[in-house]
Amino acid sequence: MIFALSLPAVVLSVACAVSYSCSDYFRKAVPSSAGVPLALFYAFLLEMPVLAAWMAVSGDTRLDAGYIPPGIAVAILGLGANFLFIVAVRRSPLSMMIPMLALVPVLTTVLGGLLLGEWPSTAQAAGILFVAAGLFTLYLPAGGGFHPIAVWRSFAAQPGAKPMAGVVLLWSMSPPVDKLCLAHAGVGMHGLIQLIILGSAAGAWVISTGGLKSLALPRGALKPLMGVALTAGLGYGLQLMAYQMTLVAVVELFKRTIGLVGAQILGRAYFQEAVTRPKIAGIAIMALGLPLVLLG
């Protein structure tokens, strides 16, 4: 795979990754008294001015009818993934859930082989083994040794593991569809349309289950939701801009690698999550594997 990686593409990719890592923290910081659909509704609603401003500054209001099929597809994927993400990080430590997202490029690569016959190269296969070994190491139980059954039990004991596996599946499908959307819409326009669709769906969900009164936010929820809106909105816009300058794989590499480290730092600093040797070793092994998977 041959590509040119410019300084602006690197800056945009890093800024995108940092923004998304911060949004992980804010999503977990939203109090559980705010139901998941309600949290999503306000997060999407508060993101809209960010993307609207982005569109106004860029001046790119391009949109054509070809946007409809991929636009609807990516909205469905986004709603499901965002819902499951909040469920996962509420149930389990940030530092144990975010590393699972390293499986996103792995799954994309494997599906490419199964469905399209685009089998991984030798380097990619080695990278997949590194990521798998890193995740295995991350979930080593205290005093449980290296037995696969003990590691599986440690993984399965995390109540957020199953919903985060769903996030991995849905997000592994999203980047190529996002890039298809950008062939028919400007960056800001695409982002704003997605937020309108997702916000409307989440709002309808909340109202249909509890009426208009259920839109009231519980105490302490507004500030972290504003943080989600700012960081996720910024991250999404930067991501779409980066897609136009370099390969999706490059942007994903920065996102996943910085996300791995950021989850450990933020988990320790704000949620008192333990930093253990298996976590450090697992993150290091996965960080070695990701470039091979994405760029091999």
Image: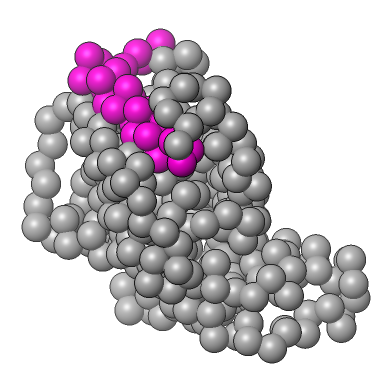
Counting from the top left corner in percent of width and height, residue 296 is at: 20, 26
Q: Nearer the viewer, residue 224 or 2?
A: 224
Q: Residue 123 lies in what quarter of the image?
A: top left
Q: Residue at x 62, y 41 (%)?
A: 157
When the figure is inspected, residue 214 is found, relative to residue 19, above or below; the finding is below
Counting from the top left corner in percent of width and height, residue 257 is at: 28, 48
Q: Residue at x 59, y 32 (%)?
A: 153
The answer to whether residue 222 is magenta is no
Q: Residue at x 47, y 22 (%)?
A: 147
When the figure is inspected, residue 215 is found, relative to residue 148, above or below; the finding is below
The answer to whether residue 133 is magenta is yes
- Magenta-tinted stretch: 117-142
Q: Is residue 145 visible?
A: yes
Please give left or right for residue 83 compared with residue 132 in the image.
Answer: right
Q: Residue at x 31, y 46 (%)?
A: 277
Q: Residue furthest bottom?
A: 219
The figure's colour scheme reads: one colour
Q: How many marks?
A: 0
Q: Residue 120 lies in what quarter of the image?
A: top left
Q: Residue 91 lies in what quarter of the image?
A: bottom right
Q: Nearer the viewer, residue 165 or 120?
A: 165
Counting from the top left corner in percent of width and height, residue 200 is at: 71, 67
Please give left or right for residue 76 compared with residue 216 in the image.
Answer: left
Predominant SS of the magenta segment: helix
Q: Is residue 178 visible?
A: no
Quadrant where the N terminus sits is: top left
Q: Nearer the viewer, residue 277 or 143?
A: 143
Counting from the top left corner in percent of width and height, residue 214 is at: 84, 78
Please give left or right for residue 245 compared with residue 173 in the image.
Answer: left
